[in-house]
Image: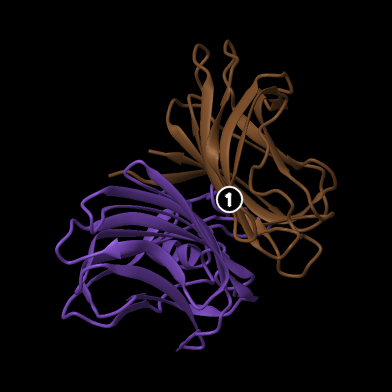
Chain colours: A brown, B purple
Amino acid sequence: MGKLVQVATNTVTSAVASVTLTGIDSDDVYMLTISGAKCSENDRYGYLRVTESGTENSSANYDKANKTLKSATSLQNDSGTNATFWDRISSLEGEFLTSGVTSNAIMYLYNMNSTTEYAFMTHEGVTFDTTNGVLGAQGGGVFTSSGTARDGVKFFWNSGNVTAGVFTLYRVV
Amino acid sequence: MSNKYGYVGKDVPTQSFGSNKGVLNTDDLYELSNAGKLTQYGQLELIETQTVSGTPSTLVFNDLQTNKYDIHFMTISNFKPQTDNRHLALRYQVNGTTTTGFDYKYAMQRQTASTSSELKSGNDSKIWLAYNCGINQNSLNGYIIFYNLKSSYAFINTHFYQIDKDNNISTNFQTAVRDEIGGVDGIEFATSGGNLEHGLFSLYGVRSFK
């Protein structure tokens, strides 16, 4: 019978620059959940990088393809290659200084422990945008570098600090 | 006297998820489990399964256990309304009462055969999960992820798949929210007209030991 196994968790209650979760050490699929995340500034994007031996990899090897869902405007396609992070993770444009507004997401991580294959991810997230419309992003990405096993992920905003949120990494077995 | 979990004297180890120590008896295991301090792997926990029976007008989940879970996961399989060409809707209950205000916002990307469409609203009285289901079509299947049902705005992400009224494969994914903070204590499903006929709805909690 399959199940989730909690690998690491971090509950943010005071401002930190980033949240890093490690412990990926098998070829299983891993699931990252983000619940109730907030930023110290409005209108910010959630970024994610993989870690190797606990250290973030900031090389230009992050590709993405997303659909941005917005109740207030037309839906948008979003893609890119060779970035130094995956963006639109958890949210973009979050109205985080408004009470109760949080950013939330679930992500699945594939091939993270491999030293020969690229690491892939799919994600879906939701928050409010700066017009008080609901805003989500769903899509995927690939880390186009191999040779070193990835043992975790680092979450941060494009500006400002992480001021709240529960970040948990699970192994899907 | 506080429970020292088999230890005596000073410097008794602290028990926590992922770090239990000593020889624990049945009472210890029960107490630690209730306190969320016992290492038990399997953090996708089934809360309740309901099977549509007797063509009800609504199906409601009231045991959400929001004190334990920040994230909920629900699967819906083999859903059919009693009448053809009906939509499946979701509303929350607060204090046991269904919310009927125009507080729901959503944005959906739908693909039906070769036609894509966007379905959006900033002020609806419900969240539409899928359109054009029917008793004479194949069933609707999919899942919903709920965030922060208790303490914040109740956000969701959804994915659904079906054969629609025109016999086309139709899939959709969506993001949605109720634009009121907290207090959700029920999840209600209904159709756009008529009753529910078939369906298996399972609600899970995604546990996080902090």
- Which residue is at 37% across, 46% downward? A3
Q: Is residue A32 left or right of residue A48?
A: left
Q: Give B56 or B63, whichever is nearer the viewer.
A: B56
Residue B125 at x, y percent in the picture: 50, 78
- The kind of residue on which mark 1 rests is Gly
- Which residue is at 53% across, 66% downward? B35
Residue pointed to by mark 1: A125
Q: Is residue A117 left or right of residue A15?
A: left
Residue A85 at x, y percent in the picture: 70, 29
Q: Is residue B120 left or right of residue A156?
A: left
Q: Give A121 or A166, whichever is nearer the viewer.
A: A121
Residue A96 in view, yes or no: yes
Secondary structure of the residue carrying numbered label 1: strand
Q: Give B33 or B158, whichever is nearer the viewer.
A: B158
Q: Is residue A168 left or right of residue A12?
A: left
Q: Identify the image quadrant of residue B164.
A: bottom left
In which quadrant will I find the C terminus of chain B?
bottom right
- Which residue is at 34% across, 76% downward? B192
Residue B40 in view, yes or no: no
- Which residue is at 45% across, 76% downward? B91
Question: Local crowd at mark 1 within 10 Å, few (<14), some, or many (≥20)?
Answer: many
Residue A43 at x, y percent in the picture: 79, 52
Residue B114 at x, y percent in the picture: 35, 41
Judging from the image, mark 1 belongs to the subunit labelled A
